[in-house]
Image: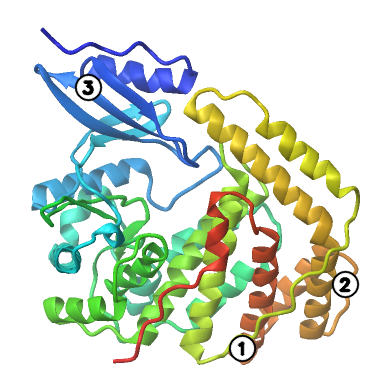
Amino acid sequence: MGMQAVPPPPDATDRKVYDWLAANIGPVTAFERQPRWRPGWNVVVERDGAPVPLYVRGPRGDTYVSPVDMFQEAEIHHVFERSGIPAPRVHGMIPDPLCIVMDMLPGGINTGTIADPQLQAQVRERFIAIVADVHRLPPEAFAAAKLPVPRTPTEIALNLYAPSQAIFRDRIGGHPWPLMEFAWAWLNRNIPQDRTRVTFVNYDGGQFLFDDSGAVTGLIDFEVSSLGDPAAELAGMRLRDSTEPLGDLTAMIARYEDLSGDRISRKLIEFHTAGFCGVNGWLMWPLMFESAPEQDYVAYLNYSVGTSRWMIRAMADYMGIALVDPAEPTEQPLGFSQASRHLVRHIEAFAGGTPAEDYARDSAAHQAFYLGRVNDFGLSVLAADLADVAALTGTRYDDWASAQSGLSAWVASVGAEADARLVQHFHNWLQRQAFMLRGCGPAAYLPTVDLQPIRER
């Protein structure tokens, strides 16, 4: 006798996923949508009389564009399966909503939770050894994934950054955004010309699962990948370390050097930290101007501000600049502050529902809270921002839109001689944005934390 199937879920999107699984793999015996900013489902299906735990990885929303699409991401899983690299096996693609159906690997994801220091060190050692194995795979192994193959040092350095910046230009809709325009110029001015090694690179590195025995059960999440400089993956691990500690990253880089024979300097890590944080900015800042209903606006704003802060600090550390924090904004309410507080209270009182509905309710409350902070501190922030732009460009603007346009033109007209001033300028702006986001949802910690420093060796 087979296992008991669970009834179809009431939510329309959930039902599409459920129906595809039932029709293409087997009876669905467990079905749970993850309550998070990106849809995903933990499911169990019955196949050949046995339970098969699966993870269904959903899309980010109609207005989000990635340099690696979900079909390429699935093919990367296939490459790893053929090459003996531990990663979830992909069972298929759901066309609507576009999802990847893959094995649910056993184990935990945060090595910071391992109580035994020896076991913790063992897991991290095994992980970096697998990364070195991945980097030994020839670029031709990824031909089916149709990843562009870089040839020159410039192409190697920018093989993910350039298409991300192109997506930004297309998606920003003509809005001047000098922060990310400066990022592109800075990266191009600082390309490491001595780097010629090309490997598969998971820029959002450091994501893997491990079991209680200390075995790494698999690498996960390859949506931000390309062929490029392997140092970029080590740099990306700094971002993962901010939420899922990886230990002493300087020591991990040194161990990678022992395993690979490569030499990874601190400045190279800072360059690619700025580059990968730039990718986050190029892909996410456009959502602040045009978002899809299913996207968590405040969560993406937290990610945008947080990763952009890290980008600017990486530039400063690369250049040897000591950043100075600006004064905090002062409270100057534009209207009745109680309006936002009342709206938050009203939204939080809504009845609960499915995990997706609960998440949407909480997201709306966080956004209402953010708008209250805009009401209370927005005038102070705007005045400080306009004063900074005037001090930098020599021109006083009366509103934020014209200041952005003027600063965008100024960024395009200057070169490396203005980098230090621009790094400090954008640090000021981002610190104020981080202040505005205090308490605005579970991702609000991101704009307040710094990445683990990389030591000189």
**Cα gap from disc 3 to disc 1, whole angstroms:** 56 Å
Task: Please say if the residues under marks 1 and 2 sit with CB atoms less than 8 Å apart.
Answer: no
Answer above or below: position of 227 versus 16. Answer: below
Q: Which residue is mark 2?
A: 397
Circle 3 residue? 45
Few, some or many residues within 10 Å of mark 1 (<14, 14–19, 20+): some
Disc 3, SS: strand
The residue positioned farthest toward the top in the image shown = 1
Q: Which residue is mark 1?
A: 420
Residue drawn at x 65%, y 83% as measured from the top left? 424
- The three-letter amino acid code for the residue at tag 3 is Val
What residue appears at the point 52 percent right and 65 percent down from the top-left corner? 307
Q: Amino acid at mark 2?
A: Tyr
* Identity, as a three-letter code, of the amino acid under mark 1: Ala
Where's residue 384, x and y in %? 81, 74
Please rate how many residues cluster around mark 2, counting C-alpha atoms within 10 Å: few if below 14, some from 14 to 19, many from 20. some
On the image, the x and y values in percent for residue 89 come to 18, 40
Secondary structure at badge 2 equals loop
- In this picture, is 412 found above or below 120? below
Labels 2 & 3 near each other (Cβ < 8 A): no
Residue at position x 87%, y 64% from top?
A: 399
Sequence-first tag of 2 and 3: 3
